[in-house]
Structure formats: structure tokens, C-alpha cells
Image (cartoon, rainbow, N blue to C red):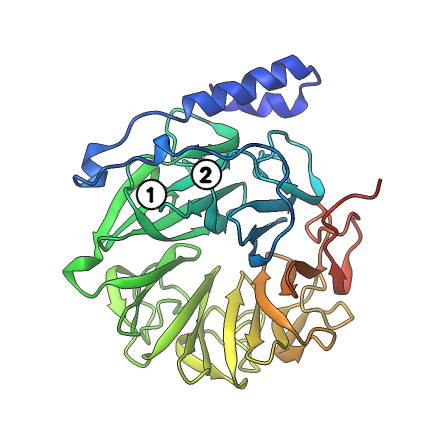
Amino acid sequence: MNRERFRSVRAASLGAFRLFCIVYVFVAGCGGESESSTGGQVDTCKDVSKPSNGDAPLGRVTAVLMSAPNACAVFEDGSMRCWGSNAYGQLGNGSFADGRYPEQTLGVPPVLQVGVGVHHMCALTMEGCVWCWGDNSEGSIGASELFGSLTPVPVDGLGKVTDLATWGDANVALRQDGKVFWWGTRGFAGYSATPELWFDSAKGALYRSVGIGAQFACGLRIDGKVECWGDNRYGQLGTGDEVNRSDPTAIAELDDVIQIALGGWSACAVRTDKSLWCWGLNEAGQLGDGTTQDRSAPQQVALEDVEEVTVFTNHTCARTTSGHVWCWGDNRFKQIGNGAMGDLIMQTWEIGSIEDARAIAAGSSATCAVRGDHDIWCWGYNKAGELGDGTYTNSSTPVQVAWDPPP
């Protein structure tokens, strides 16, 4: 199936033609495995049984994810619902219709985490498998024979994966033996339509998690150190200079880290003492140091008791242990949630109406927070329905995601 044919399905009005294309891309995505990439590991992901396509009942939300105009929620039972733009089938609901309300992703086994790209998504299942869907013109869904899929297809050749990260059109996966794989368009290092071995972290210290931004990546080691590699034009590798690196390089000034977050050309880390440190591009004040000066080494943000941080291209948000949410950076689309729209918010700003957040996610121009068992509140840009409230109205303050459309 060529690219024009896949895209033509979006414009087709005949249901039979659309159904044919959906079935075609799904069946074509269940091919064999790559012997070289698995390194001898048995890859059984394509044999995992999938759940029914019926709507799952709402349960406890364990995570919320965002990107360009999309958002997803992962539930305790492993089901997931997504909303927002669906121009490339990235909601995984078998259609190209945008979702003003959350819709269940069809046919994916129970998931642990989700990576939300610009035009595609990938999910790490409870069995350690990776499934992807949406646009594949840049190799993003890891199926070289497809130009896209409206429902999830397994990514062969990875073996058992323990962590997954997505940015733009690229993905990075950490396998349980320490090997790091990538596929899609990395920008600084080319293109691959199927997973390729990036490097073997087992030769050094094993990683507990990995992250990917625009043309760079980082790994959080089990000893609490952070290593980064790739493009370093804005100092986003945190090494104190702007020298690109093809091999992982430790950030000397940073240790005892428990979480890393990458977005665009910036990165942040939370340490065991609950302090927050950020570095890289700072053109919108997204590093939270009160300036727009890029930083090639980690700078501490004046915020205490940080539990979680989320970073996108030009804005950053943090959740404290008390459940409060603070945001800063670009506010042109009201994504800071301060009740107004403005250019830059260079100091941390508290979202006063949220005092019980359990998880947060920043997107390109919107932000979301999980409250209670399954309440999600979002704010910012809403052109594609990414706030999930059933409207296309932007909001400078949090609005609640509506799980079911009105009768």
C-alpha cells in the first residue's frame, strides 16, 4: 500500500472501501521477526491474544499522555482511551474521525504505558511487547511494509521491552537485557522503518528508563546517573558544552535522579531530594530559571517537593507531593493554565484549582492532570478536541474530560 493510497482512505466516503483498507493494513502488520535485532531472544509479541473491541468500563487512571493535538489515558486494567486529532488514524479507533470525546483504542493487548507522537502512537503492553499505529511514512510504527494503520500492529524484532519513549516521528525502546533500540526518523541519525539496535547499555551501566526529544535521547541509569547523546546545539545533553555526541555521556553534575523528562530540545530531572533540575533550550522560559538563556548544564528550578515533571517543546509542568501543579514557559495557547493568554511565563505558576493531582502530561499546546480515580482535567488549545471536553473551545483554566458523549 503506497502513501497516497493510505491517505486517500481519509477522503473516502464509501464504507466498504474504508473497511477494506483497515483490514489490509492490520493483516499486513503481523509479519515475521528480525533475527538480528532480537539477538536470540524469542519474539512472541505477534502471538499475544488481543482483547475484544468493546468499550471497557471506566476504572482507575494510571497515566495520562499528550503530544501534538492528541491525548491518551491508560487505565488500571490495561485499557486505554485517546482523543484529539485523528488525521492519520493515530487514535487507533479504526477511523480518521477526530475525537472530541475519549474513544477506546481497538485491539491492543493490556498496556502499561503509551508513547504519543505527532502522527502515530505506540504502546508498551503488560507482556513487554510494543504495538504501534497511525502514520508510517517516517517508519514510526515499525512495520516497513505499511504506510499506516488505523488499529495497533505489533512491532516485531524487539524481544521483551521494559521502557518505551516517543517523540515526533521517532521511538526508543529499552529491552530487559539493556539493549536500546530505535525506529522512525531520528533526525540527527537517519531513518529506520524497523527497530535497529542503537547501543548495548549492558556494556556499561543498565538503564531503568529512557527518554527521547528532538534529535537527542537520555537514559536514567539504575545508579541514579543520567546519560544523554545526540544533537547538542542548545546544550540539551547537559554536558556543559554544545558538542554533539554519538555515545551516551554522563551528566557530571547530576546524580540521585529518580525521573527524567525530555521534550523538544530541553530536559528535566527529579532527584531523590525532590528537587527539580532542567537544561537545554530556554527560548520560552521553559527551564523555569526566570530567563530565556539556554543552559548547557542542569539548573535548579525554584520549586520544592517535586514528585513528577513533564516537558514539551516550549513549556514545562511539575507535580508536587501534595498534588499541586505548577507550569511555566510558552503560554500563547493558554497551556500554562493561569486564566489568561500571554507570550511567556518564565516563573513557575501554580494552577490554583488543582490540589489533588496524581499524574500530569504536557502537550504541544495543552496540558492535562489526573485527579481522583478517573477524573482528568485539561487546559490550553483545543482545535482538534485535545481537551476532551466535547468542544473545540480553547480554555485558559482546567476543564474536565467528558468520558461519554451526551445522549
| Image height of 273 relative to 27, above or below | below
Instruction: Say what secondary structure mark 1 lies in.
Output: loop
Residue 25 x, y percent position in the rendering? 48, 23
Q: Residues within 10 Å of mark 1 (few under 14, many from 20)?
A: few
**Given this view, does label 1 or label 2 mark the residue nearer the observer?**
2
Q: Nearer the viewer, residue 361 or 170?
A: 361
Mark-to-mark CA distance, 1 and 2: 20 Å
Instruction: Say what secondary structure mark 2 lies in.
Output: strand
Q: Quadrant of the C terminus?
A: top right
Residue placed under numbered mark 1 in the picture: 190
Instruction: Name the residue: 63% across, 77% down.
Output: 324
| Image height of 42 relative to 80, above or below | above
Count the labels in the image: 2
**Mark nearer the N terminus (1 vs 2):** 2
Callout 1 amino acid: Gly
Question: In this view of the protein, can residue 5 be seen by the observer?
Answer: no
Q: Is residue 51 left or right of residue 209?
A: right
Q: Nearer the viewer, residue 28 or 124?
A: 124
Q: Is residue 107 left or right of residue 198?
A: right
Q: Is residue 202 left or right of residue 210?
A: left
Instruction: Name the residue: 55% across, 32% down.
Output: 52
Residue placed under numbered mark 2 in the picture: 132
Residue 125 x, y percent position in the rendering? 42, 45
Question: In this view of the protein, can residue 132 be seen by the observer?
Answer: yes
Instruction: Name the residue: 23% across, 63% down.
Output: 206
| Image height of 263 relative to 45, above or below | below
Residue 266 circle label: none
Residue 105 x, y percent position in the rendering? 57, 39
| Image height of 259 relative to 374, above or below | below
Callout 2 amino acid: Cys
Instruction: Name the residue: 40% across, 67% down.
Output: 236
